[in-house]
Image (cartoon, helix red, strand yellow):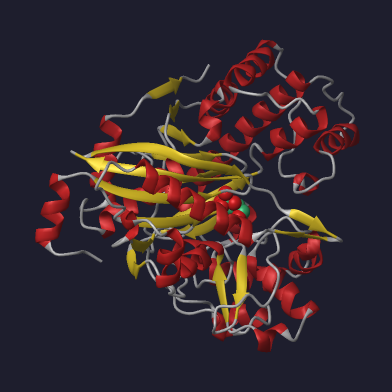
Amino acid sequence: MRCGAKLATEMRSSTLYSAAIDLGATSGRVILGAWSGNKLALTEVHRFPNTFRTLGAHDYWEPGTLWEEARRGLAEAAAALPLGARLASVGVDTWGVDSVLLNDAGRLVFPVHAYRDARTQAGLAQLGNTRAALERIYAATGIPNVFYNTSLQLAETVASCPAVADLATRCLFLPDYFNYLLSGRMENEISIASTSQLLDVHSTGWSRATLDHFHIPPHWLTPPILAGTRLGPLSGRTRASLGAPQFDRTEVVAVPGHDTACAYDAMPAAPDGSDLYLSSGTWSLVGFESATPLLGAGALEARIANERIGDGRYRPLKNVIGLWLLEGIMKDFSARPAGNREWSALIAAAEKLPAPAALLDVADPAFANPPSMRAAIDAQMKRRKLAGPKTLAAYTRLICDSLGRGHADAKAAFERMTGRAFKRILIVGGGSRNSLLCQATADAAGIPVVSFTLEGTAVGNIACQLIALGAVPDIATFRNHLGAGLKQKTYEPK
Ligand code: LFR
């Protein structure tokens, strides 16, 4: 949606302030963006840790805590504005797949499970063992059978608590839910909807056959909106709770609700499509943009997820386990580097070690949510009759080299299937600061890795708001402006 040309001109001439609420599985942040003279300046106004809580046999998020932190961040954003300035807009993105069930009055009718909850394991195995159903569902949704899929989660909810089918009238994904709290509007946004394994891969609607397969009430979901839709001003309640005049005309914009979609939007990629994208954080998401999905037996075998860009096009990607491995190992060594200096020292120590004789099989399902990551890695090494690492630096080396190989395998699979030849891998996210990981990826893939000092997800989130407000014409123009001022580092393959 665009606002009038007059307003757009007015906005271009002065600074426009937008806030990104970016919720990650291990940390959340609120970032204030100031857009002026075709340049985006970011200020991180609030950062907080996030974690799921285990209660009995299950894992849950705390939506109340997340909302509280989001509101605190908005208050900080208002406090950071220059005198007299106002916040033009706000947008929310989160990790994928997790959802809330509500009634028409917007009340939560079921606890919010976290995607690493083992409750989907039985459903995962069942679908994995039913080839015909697996093929049908992949052909319908373009999403492979992964333990965290919303499809498996909602199927388990309905099977274990059948009464929920009557209690709940709506299913909103997490960013949709926060958009609802902010604006009062219940909508499903397409990029986050596409992580569910319930969206029809050939249209922008839901796959009825897939909903039926998982016994999910179809009325829980409404036709997804595209990213960039303006949801309206902050609701009276939210506006009142924030109190400050800076929020008087703040608009809620449905940005790409999926953090990975936001991160991809921020990639200053070559317009000819020759760059492969790597969003590297808790997960490694390797993919590219495409007008068409990648389907068929080869794509299913390679576990390619045809997630959607906010405008409805495709982001075929492979999800490699990511730095979750390293986060897990840190817990086992209770030696988490305190700051950037300590991180650099650990990476430098790992870089000095000889390359490991054999790499991890990063697709091992045992790595999904183990009680001890070190024990899970050791068990795999033992099973394969390999000597395991002993020190934190040695684990770090093994993990980074193995992820590099995983990234390169994803590239090879995409090239095989599309006939494309990627020339560079662009990396954003926490992993872009990890020189060991960047070099390992370049070495394994045989092409340069270009890392950007860029809060990719927040930048993509804000880019969508700027486009919705009419301050920037489209994402290609935004990337052009962004690329001009970015610091980058290139890792050549050795
Ligand atoms: C990254 C991410 C991935 C998704 C995983 C689980 O934060 O959104 O894209 O596959 O979380 O939802």
Instruction: Reply above or below: 433 against 16.
Output: above
Instruction: Using the image as rendered, state which of residue 54 and residue 155 is in the foreground.
Output: 54
Which quarter of the figure has residue 44? Answer: top left
Please say if 440 is above or below 193. Answer: above
Q: How many marks?
A: 0
Q: Where's residue 414, x and y in %?
A: 51, 46
Q: Is residue 139 visible?
A: yes
Q: Residue furthest top?
A: 352
Which of the 4 quarters of the picture holds residue 255?
bottom left
66, 296: nearer the viewer: 66
In percent of the image, x 76 and y 84: which residue is there?
A: 162
* Vertical comparison of 180 with 421: above or below: below
Rendering quarter of residue 97: bottom right
Instruction: Depth check: give the residue in front, 353 or 137.
Output: 353
> With 15 as the anchor, is 281 left or right in this view?
right
Question: Is residue 418 visible in this depiction of the protein?
Answer: no
Q: Name the one closer to the observer, 430 or 142.
A: 430
Residue located at (42% from left, 50% from top) = 20
Residue at image position (25%, 66%) is: 1
95 to the left or right of 10 = right
The percent coordinates of residue 480 (x first, y second) are 25, 39
- Residue 270 place in picture, x, y as percent: 31, 38
Indicate whether 424 appears above or below 475. above
* Residue 484 position within the rendered picture, expressed as x and y whole percent measured from the top left: 26, 31
